[in-house]
Image: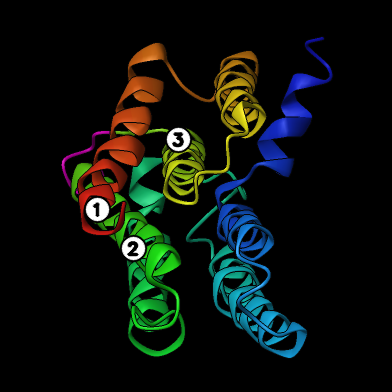
Amino acid sequence: MKKILPIFSYILHPIFISMYATLFYLFCKGDIFTNQEKYYVLFQILIITILVPVLFFMLLRSTGHVKSVMVHETSQRKIPLILQCFLYILLVKRSIVIMRYPELHFFFLGALFSTILALIGSLFKIKASLHMMAISGFTVFVIGLSIHLQMQNPYWTALMVFLTGIVASSRLVMEAHTNKELLIGLALGIFPQMLFLYLWL
């Protein structure tokens, strides 16, 4: 089991959560959008939340500013988190606009606030689990969207809670975080999403 759990730290890496959330959103509201629009949205998410951060990470790694894709040191997190903030702002301002994609818009807005809080924490050398922050925010979004669309399907919620536990276990097995850091990440992911739920739920 200890050999399997670390795999989830990569499968559920924060860099992929935006894509997973978008896929879930488009799946749940599939009748509203054309296939062409779905592909266009997914392409934007792919470029902005995955390809750009990966290229930027490669640049930072080549210059010695980061050592690992997991970015363990708080001092190495500042630049990636600042970039992530700007990318989320770009998304909510230009791509995932409130008039067309209200629920997804507020998810990314919540993710932006979570990232800002994580950045502030890193400035004070407070380390939060970014994995837990991402997966817990995604979990709240799935639960909120399930309620909003009256999906009557408890399996999505159960799956997300299970995956949150798996990610926490994975980070502990890899000795990447302490329990405190996992709880901080959990709180940073949940509370901004909960606050924005009131605006669209």
**Sequence order check, earlier mark of 2 and 3:** 2
Chief SS of the magenta region: loop
Query: In the rendered structure, which amino acid carries the disc numbered 3?
Result: Ser
Query: In the rendered structure, which amino acid carries the disc numbered 2?
Result: Phe
Instruction: Tell me: 32 left or right of 133.
Output: right
Residue topped by disc 2: 106
Q: From which residue to which does the magenta span run?
A: 122-126
Dot 1 lies on which element? helix
Bin the neighbour count of mark 2 within 10 Å (Cα to Cα): few under 14, some 14-19, many 20 and up: many
Nearest the viewer among 71 and 13 is 13
Residue topped by disc 1: 196
Query: In the rendered structure, which amino acid carries the disc numbered 1?
Result: Phe
Residue 87 percent coordinates (x, y): 42, 76
**Sequence order check, earlier mark of 1 and 2:** 2
Bin the neighbour count of mark 1 within 10 Å (Cα to Cα): few under 14, some 14-19, many 20 and up: some
Dot 2 lies on which element? helix
**Sequence order check, earlier mark of 1 and 3:** 3
Nearest-to-viewer mark from 1 and 3: 1
Colouring chosen for the image of the structure: rainbow
Rounded to the nearest angstrom, the CA distance separating label 1 from label 2 is: 6 Å
12 part of magenta stretch: no
Rounded to the nearest angstrom, the CA distance separating label 2 from label 3 is: 15 Å
Residue topped by disc 3: 136
| Residue drawn at 56 percent across, 15 percent down | 172
Bin the neighbour count of mark 3 within 10 Å (Cα to Cα): few under 14, some 14-19, many 20 and up: many
